[in-house]
Each structure stands twice: as structure tokens, then as C-alpha cells.
Amino acid sequence: MAAEKQFENKVKRFLCSVGVYPAGTPESKMTVACNGWFTKIWGGGFQKSGIPDLICCVNGIFIAPELKASNGRSSELQKLNISIINKSKGIGIILYPEGFENFKKLILGVIDCNTHIPELIALKNALSSTKCAIWTK
């Protein structure tokens, strides 16, 4: 378990270094421009089983990595949830340390990709109302 926690911390440090910050990070603590948000999911009695370790929104894209140590194994429920995320047009990943460089390239590519932003902004503006508040400030 220690190897998985070390890998988790490495992933979190990378995310912060490219502007993808933990939930609740104040702007004054952000060292680079904000490109996204993430939260750590804790398994236990009050949380559904099989949810990926990190839930991220990077440049408007949903990304959910399940982190594993090199010798770790995913449960069938974790594999099912990752599959459903991908079928839903999000990005679900079972991530091992050996795939970390590819993960970094993926995140940087999502940050650099701006093709979906104008359409998404127009859709959010068109559908925001007092009964469907989309907070922008």
C-alpha cells in the first residue's frame, strides 16, 4: 500500500504543477494558472466501492484515474466503472507507475486542447437560469 500512496502523491504533485488543483485550493495558493480541479475519493463505509481514486475536471474534460502500484490489481467493479466512464465520453484510466509518462502527456494534451471550449461556453450561457445556476465567478 505504501507504493500506491507514493505514486498517488506523485500524480497529485504533477497535477498541481500544471494547474490542476485539489478541491478547495484558494487562488492565493495557486502557483500556475488554474486549468482544472481534482478530488481524492476515499474508500470506506460511506463511499460506493469501485470509484476511481481521483476525480478530475481538466479543461472541461472529466478524467478519473484509478491508481495502482506496479504489482496492484484492479477489481472487477473498478474495471466496470472505468469502462462506463469511457462509454460516457469521459476518460477513465487504470494507471500504473509505468504509464505515468503517458498520463502526463494526456493531461498536457487535454490542457492544450481548446476545440470544445467555445461550444461549451455557448451552451452553458444559453442554459443558465435562476433554476439552473452555472456559477462562473
Image (spheres, rainbow, N blue to C red):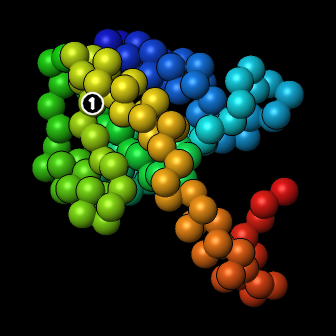
Res. 112 visible in picture: yes
Query: Is 57 in front, or is 9?
Result: 57
In the figure, residue 48 lies in which quadrant? bottom left
Res. 41 visible in picture: no
**Label total for image:** 1
Where does the image place residue 97, in percent across and percent down from the top left? 27, 17
Where does the image place residue 130, in percent across and percent down from the top left? 81, 84
Q: Is residue 131 left or right of residue 58?
A: right
Q: Is residue 57 left or right of residue 106?
A: right
Where does the image place residue 98, in percent across and percent down from the top left? 22, 16
Q: Quickly name the residue at label 1.
A: 95
Q: Is residue 117 left or right of residue 96?
A: right
Give above or below for 86 relative to 68: below
Residue drawn 24% across the image and 37% down it? 94
Q: Amino acid at mark 1?
A: Leu
Where does the image place residue 8, in percent across and percent down from the top left? 42, 22
Residue drawn 44% across the image and 22% down it? 11
